Image (spheres, helix red, strand yellow):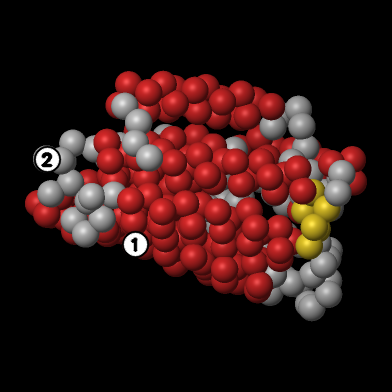
Amino acid sequence: MNISLETFRIILYVMAALAVVVFFALYQVKAGYGILFDKSWGITLSNKWAWMIMEAPVFIAMCWFWMMSPRKWDLVPFIFFLLFQIHYLQRAFIFPWLIKGKSRMPLLIMFTGIVFNLANAFIQGQWIFFLAPTSMYTQSWIRDPRFLLGTALFLAGLIINIQSDGIIRNLRKDGDSNHYLPEKGLFRYVWNGWVLPYSPGLSADSFSSSGLLPILFHGRTPSTRNTRTNFPMKWPAIPANAYSPLFISSI
């Protein structure tokens, strides 16, 4: 499926506006999962299954865009595809089955995650495999500082993400659903230490507005604020300036 560049830009503008709305909405609405879990969100599903169902569609959708593209074997688009899929392979098919505890996720949140992930696959797939100028992602791009910086950021983010997941996971014993404050690794310096810097890396890799857009959705400092506000007695050590490192890296 292919669309015009003009239509693509309109979609980006709409999604950017939606990201701003979501940002401010999170100051008023609790996320409804994890430590902010709220039964008022309705029917729930095991975290393991919910995470896989939420993340798997983007992996599948990106495969479809890649297979349909006349550029699928071009070196640079293929590298973009591999980096994107490495991230979602880990998030959809490895991370969920390592989760400890018996936490649950509301189906409504799972479905909103699916919508975002499919939109992400759509804008990345359309730009990389169909709409980007054919003269842009030639083999010379792999020597471009933007590509080298983006790849370095992505690989650093991959390592930090997996390490931080392990730190959080090891706070619990099997069957434990309590929440604890992580204090190792990057968590010693920032809150939400597991989100640095996947999206900035991919954004710098492709140097595109479609790559930048997910940062707007992921840099959700209000979520941090809500956690500090609602649990000051349990977690008094959370510093007021402990912003998401992904937000910091995207400024």
| Nearest to the observer: residue 141 or residue 160 | 141
Q: Earlier in the sequence, mark 1 or mark 2?
A: 1
Alpha carbon distance from label 1 to label 2: 21 Å
Question: Could you tell me residue 207's position as x and y percent?
Answer: 27, 40
Amino acid beneath label 1:
Leu
| Residue 14 seen in the current view | yes
Residue at the disc numbered 1: 82
Q: Position of residue 206 (x, y in %)?
A: 28, 45
SS class of the residue under badge 2? loop
Name the spot of residue 64 as percent of width and height, x first: 41, 53
Q: Is residue 143 above or below residue 2?
A: below
Q: Tell me: 236 left or right of 85.
A: right
Name the residue tied to disc 2.
Answer: 135
Amino acid at dot 2: Ser
- Residue 224 seen in this snapshot: no
Q: Is residue 141 left or right of residue 28?
A: left
Kindly indicate the quadrant of the structure image that contains residue 152: bottom left
Across and down, in percent, residue 77 comes to 25, 52
Height in image: 17 above or below 210?
A: above
